[in-house]
Image (spheres, rainbow, N blue to C red):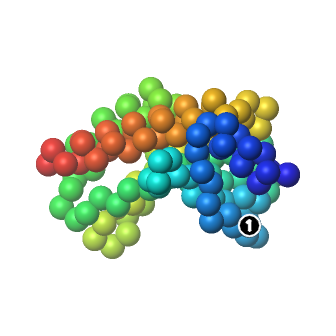
């Protein structure tokens, strides 16, 4: 049911979902593509009240997130996105995502969340490239 709904709404939004997976923790996981470009992922846990649309960036060693971190947090808050930072050896993984409740999950909200995600990821790249 959730997979079918996601496909219909993605099509309505002009997006393509690919690589659907179901796991012990996730009812739905899929890559999101727009015009042949990977723009993030869509996920829904078994008990989640809605879908999560997100993306991940890897920030290389030598980039200080102390300076950029506060700016990233402010920027993503304006766009209603969550952000987490995970140190992985010499790099930091930055995870950005937005949640859409099932009742408000439409093609339009999906597209807007993907656009906000894209804007946030581009801003993170811009902020970390300044160093």
Q: Residue furthest right?
A: 1
- Residue with the most extreme top position: 78
**In the displayed structure image, the side of residue 9 where residue 81 appears, left or right:** left
Q: Residue at x 61, y 37 (%)?
A: 13
Relative horizontal placement of residue 80, taking residue 25 as reference (left or right): left
Q: Position of residue 15 (x, y in %)?
A: 58, 45
Q: Quadrant of residue 110?
A: top right
Secondary structure at numbered mark 1: loop
Give the residue at the far left of this rendering: 131
Q: Quadrant of residue 94?
A: bottom left
The residue closer to the viewer here, 18 or 46, is 18
* Residue indicated by mark 1: 22
Q: Is residue 66 above or below residue 109?
A: below
Residue at the limit of the structure toward the bottom, as seen here: 89
Q: Is residue 52 visible?
A: yes
- Given residues 8 and 52, the one toward you in this image is 8
Residue drawn at (43%, 41%) of the image: 118
Comparing 18 with 91, the one in front is 18
List x then y, in percent, for residue 121. 38, 44
Please determine whether, in this image, residue 103 is positioned above or below residue 94: above
Residue 55 visible in the snapshot: no
Residue at 59% across / 40% down in the picture? 14
Q: Position of residue 43 (x, y in %)?
A: 65, 54
Residue 30: quadrant of the picture: bottom right
**Category of crowding for the residue at label 1, using alpha-carbon neighbours closer than 10 angstroms: few (below 14), some (14–19), many (at least 20):** some
Residue at 79% from the left image edge and 32% from the top image edge: 103
């Amino acid at each position: 049911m959730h997979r079918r709904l996601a496909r219909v709404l993605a099509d309505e939004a002009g997006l393509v979902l690919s690589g659907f997976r179901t796991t012990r923790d996730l009812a739905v996981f899929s890559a999101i593509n727009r015009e042949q470009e990977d723009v993030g992922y869509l996920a829904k846990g078994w008990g989640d009240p809605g879908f999560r649309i997100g993306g991940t960036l890897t920030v290389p060693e030598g980039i200080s997130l102390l300076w950029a971190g506060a700016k990233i947090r402010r920027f993503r808050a304006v766009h209603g996105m969550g952000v987490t930072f995970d140190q992985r050896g010499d790099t930091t993984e930055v995870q950005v995502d937005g949640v859409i409740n099932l009742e408000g999950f439409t093609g339009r909200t999906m597209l807007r969340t993907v656009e906000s995600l894209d804007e946030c990821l581009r801003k993170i790249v811009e902020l970390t490239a300044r160093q």
